[in-house]
Amino acid sequence: MSVVIKADTNELYRKVLSIKETAADIHQQLLNISGLTSDLGKYWQGDAYERHKTSSKAIVEDMIPIVAMLETRPEQLFKMAGIYETVEDFNKREAASLDPNVIE
């Protein structure tokens, strides 16, 4: 009797890690945007710069909490992957202990 695993926990771990790394990268890029916007004030002044700075700041402030959530949520997905792994290991052991003709 072959044992078929329904949940590929390694794939889940890889995807979750990718999400976490991408969110951290986005967070860093948002901080970089804030720095660049501030640096523009050295060259670009007046109402246009102030409007650009205000608009950019508002966008970054809106996005930071969303990205922060994306950085923390993967921990829950890691826990879920661990649960899947535990259940699949249990199911494999149980299936292996059955008589091969049990389904016939």
Image (cartoon, rainbow, N blue to C red):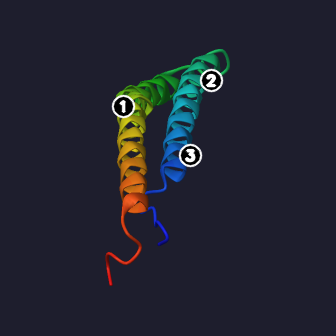
- Rendered residue at 38%/25% (across/down): 61
Q: Residue at x 44, y 30 (%)?
A: 71
Residue 43 is labelled as none
Q: Position of residue 46 (x, y in %)?
A: 52, 20
Q: Amino acid at mark 3?
A: Arg
Label located before the other in sequence (3 or 1)? 3
- 88 over 27 or under it: above or below: below
Per the image, the residue denoted by label 2 is: 36
**Residue labelled with disc 1:** 69
Mark 1 vs 2: CB contact within 8 A: no
Provide the secondary structure element on which disc 2 rests.
helix
Residue at the farthest top position:
42
- Name the residue that disc number 3 marks: 14
Q: Is residue 33 left or right of residue 43?
A: left
Residue at x-position 57% and y-position 17%? 38
Observer-nearest residue: 31 or 39? 31
Residue toward you, 19 or 86: 86
Q: Distance of mark 1 from mark 2, alpha carbons?
A: 24 Å
Considering the image in quadrants, where does the C terminus appear? bottom left
* Lateral position of residue 36 relative to residue 77, left or right: right
Secondary structure of residue under mark 3: helix
Circle 2: is it few (<14), some (14-19), or many (20+) Cα within 10 Å?
few
Q: Quote the CA–CA distance across marks 3 and 1.
A: 19 Å
